[in-house]
């Protein structure tokens, strides 16, 4: 039986884009690989905030059992919420995951959307709870640094989650 995984992320974990009134399916090798290896519930979209991810987690973790959770948040929060709200929400999400025996894996903000204040919050949560972090640059807190290719990112996700 496959392990169960829940994903709360932005563009990295989406398989569809909405552009000028049309939806387009995009090839996402990382998401395809996760679908092969896990029973996956994916809430990712480019406007997913930590507040919304927390709401989803509170609902779906009551009704379902999961083994792993990928968190790639911050891009939408940097436009829609304060740093303090973001930190509070991440802390609540991690606590909720731990209370449900779910292993969290964080993914840093992608370089094109990176806001240093929000990334610093992610880094501090990772350090506080001794969590795994996949980073897109050289980061002292990172378990894996994927600085050049999608293949490195896919390998890091698989190594941390399998």
Image (cartoon, rainbow, N blue to C red):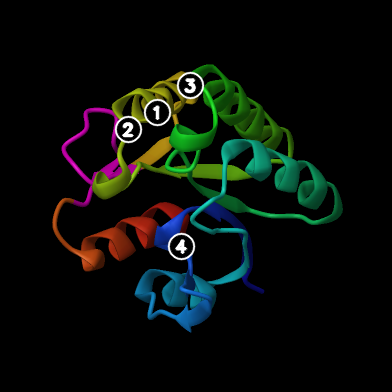
Q: Which mark is residue 118?
A: 1
Residue stretch in magenta: 134-146
Question: Circle 4 sits on which residue?
Answer: 13
Quarter of the image holding residue 2? Answer: bottom right
Do the residues bearing badges 1 and 3 touch, measured as CB atoms within 8 Å?
yes
Dot 2, crowdedness within 10 Å: few (<14), some or many (≥20)?
some
Do the residues bearing badges 1 and 4 touch, measured as CB atoms within 8 Å?
no
The image position of residue 30, as x and y in percent, is 38, 69
Quadrant in the picture for the N terminus: bottom right
- Badge 4 element: helix
Residue at x-position 58% and y-position 52%: 68
- Badge 1 element: helix
Mark 3–mark 4 distance (CA, rounded to whole Å): 23 Å
The image position of residue 40, as x and y in percent, is 61, 67
Mark 2 or mark 4: name the one nearer the start of the chain.
4
Dot 3, crowdedness within 10 Å: few (<14), some or many (≥20)?
some
Mark 1 or mark 4: name the one nearer the start of the chain.
4
In the rendered image, the vertical position of residue 112 relative to residue 2, given as above or below: above
Residue at x-position 64% and y-position 44%: 53
Mark 1–mark 4 distance (CA, rounded to whole Å): 19 Å
Q: Is residue 141 left or right of residue 59?
A: left
- Badge 3 element: helix
Question: Circle 3 sits on which residue?
Answer: 83
Do the residues bearing badges 1 and 2 touch, measured as CB atoms within 8 Å?
yes
Which callout, 2 or 4, points to the residue nearer the camera?
Answer: 2
Q: Is residue 144 magenta?
A: yes
Mark 1 or mark 3: name the one nearer the start of the chain.
3
Do the residues bearing badges 2 and 3 touch, measured as CB atoms within 8 Å?
no
Mark 3 or mark 4: name the one nearer the start of the chain.
4
């Amino acid at each position: 039986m496959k392990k169960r995984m829940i994903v709360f992320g932005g563009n990295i974990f989406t398989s569809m884009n909405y552009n000028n009134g049309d939806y387009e399916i995009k090839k996402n090798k990382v998401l395809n690989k996760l679908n092969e290896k896990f029973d996956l519930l994916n809430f990712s979209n480019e406007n997913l905030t930590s507040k919304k991810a927390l709401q989803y987690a509170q609902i779906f973790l009551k009704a379902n059992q999961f083994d792993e959770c990928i968190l790639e948040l911050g891009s939408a929060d940097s436009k829609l919420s304060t740093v303090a709200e973001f930190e509070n929400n991440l802390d609540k999400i991690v606590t909720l995951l731990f209370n449900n025996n779910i292993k969290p894996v964080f993914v840093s903000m992608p370089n094109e959307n990176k806001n240093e204040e929000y990334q610093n919050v992610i880094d501090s949560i990772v350090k506080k709870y001794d969590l795994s972090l996949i980073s897109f640059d050289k980061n002292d807190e990172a378990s894996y640094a994927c600085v050049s290719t999608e293949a490195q990112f896919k390998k890091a996700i698989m190594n941390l989650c399998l």
